[in-house]
Amino acid sequence: MLLGIRYILLSGLSFILVNFLVKLLGGNNAISSYFEFQTFGAHELVFFRSLVSFIISAIVIKRKAIPFFGNNKKWLFVRGISGVVALTIFFFSLQNLPLAVASILQYLSPIFTVILAAIILKDKILKLQWILIILAFCGVLLIGYDNLVSDSEIVIDPTWMILGIVSAFFSAIAYIAIVKLKNTDKPITIVLYFPMMALPFTGIWCLFDFVLPIGWEWIILILIGVFTQIAQILMTKALHTADTAKIVPFQYLGAIYAIIIGWFVFDERLSWILIAGMFIIIICVILNTIYQHRLKSNT
């Protein structure tokens, strides 16, 4: 269990590092101006992230002699497309929302997963789960309410809040697809389909809006791809090493990392109402996840 916790903590640190680097190259902050970094669109960041992931995944597949295009192509395609939409919107939200708020909204994906699992996988949603789902969205409303009553310098655009929630929804679709692929395709093949779908889409987009990286920007773009791959591997190892219900709460320490980095690095001074809304979401997601896994372990 200690090894699983270690993996999950390192995975969370890797993910928050990726989010930090994405925000760094997304502009709209004093740090980017200080280092004189250019501003990169979310689509270009997804393109470079996908390029690194594709190269790594393709090498692994070739070495292990795994069928390149997999078996269940329908759900592999769904996983790829939904993942591309989710990540692209999430990167845009990172550039336009405080780091902590964008990260917290992405954590709504397990809530959407429960709802989609009931529709697609015919799982039951119990009364306690419905209560937690409603409370989680009350946390979202509290974040929105903060804009009306707070005199903070940080103004949260409701459009980007909604898109952040949409990103979480598509992340949930990707997770449902992974569940459907569990018995038909290898994890590395499932991972591969994301860059396979992302590269043509974002590549065409980059033809119309491309910023040529210079100097350290190349290193940062490569690190975004490398640390995303590391984070996914560590997460998989964590879930395979220990009881999911016991280690999942440590995954959401990423919310604490995001608040600290946003506060001290990007000078994102969040109000107490905003922080309260975010913690309501996190607590509800954690309780729902633990409850769900305990139900499965008892059946």
Image: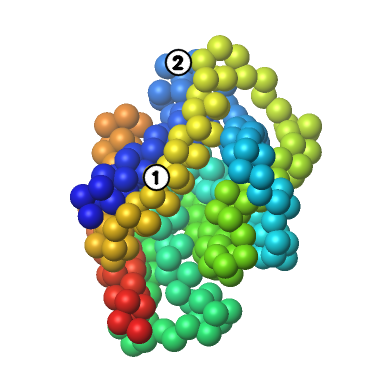
User: Mark 2 touching mark 1, by CB under 8 A?
Assistant: no
Residue 49 x/y as whole percent? 58, 36
Q: Nearer the viewer, residue 41 or 4?
A: 4
For residue 51, what is the image quadrant? top right
Residue positioned 56% across, 44% down in the render: 92
Q: Amino acid at mark 1?
A: Leu
Residue 210 as seen in the image, left or right of residue 87: right
Is residue 194 visible in the rendered image? The answer is no
**Is residue 55 shown above or below 152?**
above
Residue 25 x/y as whole percent? 52, 28
Residue that badge 1 annotates? 234
Residue positioned 71% across, 40% down in the render: 199
Is residue 290 visible in the rendered image? The answer is yes
How many residues crowd around disc 1 within 10 Å: few (fewer than 14), some, or many (20 or more)?
many
In front: label 2 or label 1: 1
Residue 278 as seen in the image, left or right of residue 54: left
For residue 19, what is the image quadrant? top left
Disc 1 is placed on an element classified as: helix
**Is residue 136 shown above or below 230?**
below
Residue positioned 35% across, 84% down in the render: 299
Residue that badge 2 annotates? 35
First in residue order: circle 2 vs circle 1: 2
